Amino acid sequence: MFDDFFRERQIRRALKAVARQRVAMVLQPGNIQVIERGTPDEEWFELGVRTCHIRGWVEVLHENLPTGAVRFQGSNPQFPEEMASKNHYRLTEGGWAVLNRSHGWVLATFLVSTIGLVVAAVSLVVAWLALPQSGEQAHGNHAMANPAVELTVPGVQLRAAQVGVVPPWSADHL
């Protein structure tokens, strides 16, 4: 049941191992690259990196590159007597996208924007339904919306026209 999960985790570990490599120095003569944090010589890495190669996340940079642990005594490098040959890989753009989980971010962004679009559409529909339809009058508490509205003050009943209510935006007010 969890076998696929663990296999995918090993594949991502192999991808991260390729991404962690860095060139520490270049030895002369011969332009020999000394790579820090090189890839492990284990079976899980070989299987993982080959799966990454199939998926297009890594590509072979150098085939059958002589590989071994270099020791330094002072400034002189000491190479091992027997050097194994390995392929040297590099990440592709797709591999970097997998490491940064760009696909997940794109999906999350799309989901959030879709939810925002749905909320905006629903609010427009609700606002449209709340508008008065043609032939209906708006029912408001404004006395100036209908000048014949009667204002009721406790004990006194006045009509708006009798009081002389002037809206603040009219020229008579100034």
Image (spheres, helix red, strand yellow):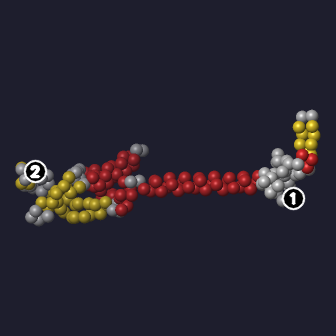
Relative vertical location of residue 152 with respect to residue 47 in this rendering, above or below: above
Residue situated in front as seen by the camera: 108 or 85: 108
| Left or right side of 102 for 31 | left
Contact flag, marks 1 and 2 (Cβ < 8 Å) = no
Q: Which-is-in-front pick, marks 1 and 2? A: 1
Q: Residue 99 shows which numbered tag?
A: none
**Is residue 48 visible in the rendered structure shown here?**
no
Task: Look at the image and tell me in which quarter the C terminus lies.
Answer: bottom right
Asked whether 106 or 82 is in front, the reply is 106
Q: Secondary structure at mark 1?
A: loop
Q: Which residue is mark 2?
A: 71
Q: Quadrant of the N terminus?
A: top left
Residue at x-position 92% and y-position 34%: 155
Q: Secondary structure at mark 2?
A: strand
Residue at the spot 9% in from the left edge and 64% down from the top edge: 29
From the top left corner, tell me how far across and down residue 5 is, in percent. 39, 47
- Identify the residue at image location x=28%, y=60%: 90
Q: Position of residue 160 (x, y in %)?
A: 89, 47
As shown in the figure, which amino acid type bears the numbered disc 2? Arg
Foreground: 161 or 34? 161
* Residue that protrudes farthest toward the top in the picture: 155
Spatial separation of the CA atoms under disc 1 and disc 2: 93 Å
Q: Residues within 10 Å of mark 2 (few under 14, many from 20)?
A: few
Residue found at the far front of this picture = 174
Residue at left 25%, top 54%? 21
Give the residue number, with chain letter if any, for mark 1.
135
Describe residue 94's horizontal placement relative to residue 74 as left or right. right
Q: Whole-percent x and y of residue 102? A: 42, 56
Q: Quadrant of residue 96?
A: bottom left
- Amino acid type, label 1: Gly
Residue 75 is at least partly visible in this image: yes
